[in-house]
């Protein structure tokens, strides 16, 4: 057994040392695999970035209350009386100003994108003063807060980057008037950074919503008390509501987009991977053909067929891993942190986010490269091991 491993090690080391003697075919396979990995990691980083933006939006101690049967804020509707009953429910955290429960209005406005000038749906959220206590991750980074009762807005940093008119000092059309942008805020990279916020009391008449709201965000005294709080509300005959954790709500919203992107990315990488396999096959067949007499001589000297197979596979694996590492590195440099916006099909509004090339994605890409290399090297390796010694030695 020790002798067999020695043969494999010696042959593999020798094969790897001769890789660059076949520069043309080796480079073609290497860069083909690198391209596949770069595309795979790049596309999947879109899904990962979108998922991260949605997951960063939720807090485990925050409950979202919608009308019963509604899956999104757009489909929900709550009366002022209902929001007051919710705020008075036991289990909600309180501060000096009362319950940390914010009744909110969610509408969509059209604004042009900075990159293309085409109109896109941007969420405009009307909030109550308690919203900043419920969302402890929100921080004003430029300007000042809007004044309650005035046509003023503050804008998430992601929305400011993506859409025209949202820079500090700018103005946007809301209803029949233009409202001034007085502040820019961050929200820990979450979906809130894609939104525009204003006073719900001012937004309601602008869209003729009367005293209605669409959701209530409530901070609980204890995350573990969620089920008790939910039971209190859903069994209260005065209201007809649905209660979900904020984390679960945003996780559900990210599912459709991430599954679509992941599916398309995997399909594209799979099709490209087939081409890369053929490139690896060509490279390794060329390597075997150029070393026919050398392989036959080794066989005649007592090297086993298994050692020959593993040496050829080892060579293919080295090429694949180098290509995979190059592709993963290129994807990281090109895509990580790249900012864009896409449609959230649950709310039909734009979500600004950054591509996220995670270590797990890089390892996945390199693993895929290794798989391509092993598949591409398998048949040439078997051919090398089965080559008749006598006829191979006669080849010039």
Image (tube, rainbow, N blue to C red):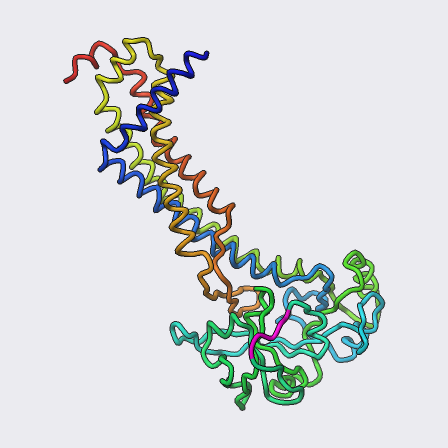
Residue depicted at 51% across the width and 57% down the height: 49
Residue depicted at 71% across the width and 79% down the height: 129
Q: Position of residue 360 (x, y in %)?
A: 51, 45
Instruction: Say if the magenta span includes residue 141.
Output: yes
Q: Position of residue 238 (x, y in %)?
A: 83, 72
Residue depicted at 37% across the width and 45% down the height: 326
Query: Along the line of sight, which residue is nearer the eye, 16 or 173?
Result: 16
Q: Is residue 109 above or below residue 324?
A: below
Q: Position of residue 73 (x, y in %)?
A: 64, 70
Residue 376 falls left or right of residue 349:
left
Query: Along the line of sight, which residue is nearer the eye, 50 or 5?
Result: 5
Q: Is residue 279 above or below residue 104?
A: above
Residue 136 falls left or right of residue 254:
right
Span colored in magenta: 138-142
In terms of image quadrants, where is residue 2? top left
In terms of image quadrants, where is residue 214? bottom right
Residue 313 falls left or right of residue 340:
left
Instruction: Say if the magenta span includes residue 122.
Output: no
Q: Position of residue 364 (x, y in %)?
A: 47, 42
In terms of image quadrants, where is residue 138? bottom right
Q: Is residue 290 above or below residue 69?
A: above
Quadrant where the C terminus sits is top left
By secondary structure, the bulk of the magenta-drawn segment is best described as: strand
Query: Along the line of sight, which residue is nearer the eye, 144 or 396?
Result: 144
Q: How many marks?
A: 0
Residue depicted at 68% across the width and 76% down the height: 104
Q: Residue furthest left?
A: 396
Q: Is residue 345 above or below residue 285?
A: below
């Amino acid at each position: 057994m020790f002798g067999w491993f020695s043969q494999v090690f010696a042959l593999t080391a020798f094969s790897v040392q001769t890789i660059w003697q076949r520069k043309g075919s080796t480079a073609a396979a290497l860069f083909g695999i690198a391209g596949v990995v770069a595309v795979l990691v790049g596309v999947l980083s879109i899904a990962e970035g979108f998922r991260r933006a949605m997951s960063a939006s939720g807090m485990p101690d925050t409950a979202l209350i919608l009308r019963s049967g509604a899956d999104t804020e757009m489909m929900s509707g709550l009366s002022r009386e209902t929001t007051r009953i919710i705020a008075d429910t036991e289990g909600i955290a309180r501060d000096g100003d009362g319950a940390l429960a914010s009744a909110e209005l969610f509408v969509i406005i059209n604004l042009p994108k900075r990159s293309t000038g085409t109109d896109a749906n941007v969420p405009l959220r009307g909030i109550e003063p308690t919203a900043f206590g419920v969302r402890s991750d929100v921080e004003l980074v430029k300007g000042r807060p809007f004044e309650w009762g005035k046509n003023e807005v503050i804008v998430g940093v992601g929305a400011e980057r993506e859409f025209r008119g949202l820079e500090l000092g700018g103005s946007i059309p809301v209803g029949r008037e233009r409202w001034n942008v007085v502040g820019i805020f961050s929200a820990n990279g979450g979906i809130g950074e894609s939104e525009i916020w204003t006073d719900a009391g001012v937004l309601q008449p602008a869209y003729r919503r009367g005293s209605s709201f669409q959701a209530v965000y409530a901070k609980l005294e204890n995350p573990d008390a969620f089920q008790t709080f939910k039971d209190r509300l859903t069994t209260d005959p005065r209201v007809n509501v649905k209660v979900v954790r904020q984390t679960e709500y945003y996780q559900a919203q990210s599912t459709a987009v991430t599954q679509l992107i992941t599916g398309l990315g995997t399909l594209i990488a799979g099709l490209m991977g087939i081409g890369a396999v053929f490139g690896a096959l060509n490279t390794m067949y060329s390597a075997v053909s150029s070393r026919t007499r050398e392989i036959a001589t080794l066989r005649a000297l007592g090297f086993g067929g298994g050692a020959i197979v593993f040496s050829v596979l080892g060579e293919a694996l080295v090429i694949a891993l180098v290509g995979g590492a190059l592709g993963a590195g290129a994807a990281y440099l090109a895509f990580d942190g790249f900012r864009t916006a896409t449609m959230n099909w649950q709310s039909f509004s734009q979500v600004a986010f950054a591509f996220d090339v995670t270590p797990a994605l890089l390892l996945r890409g390199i693993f895929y490269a290794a798989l391509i290399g092993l598949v591409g090297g398998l048949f040439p390796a078997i051919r090398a091991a089965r080559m008749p010694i006598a006829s191979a030695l006669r080849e010039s």
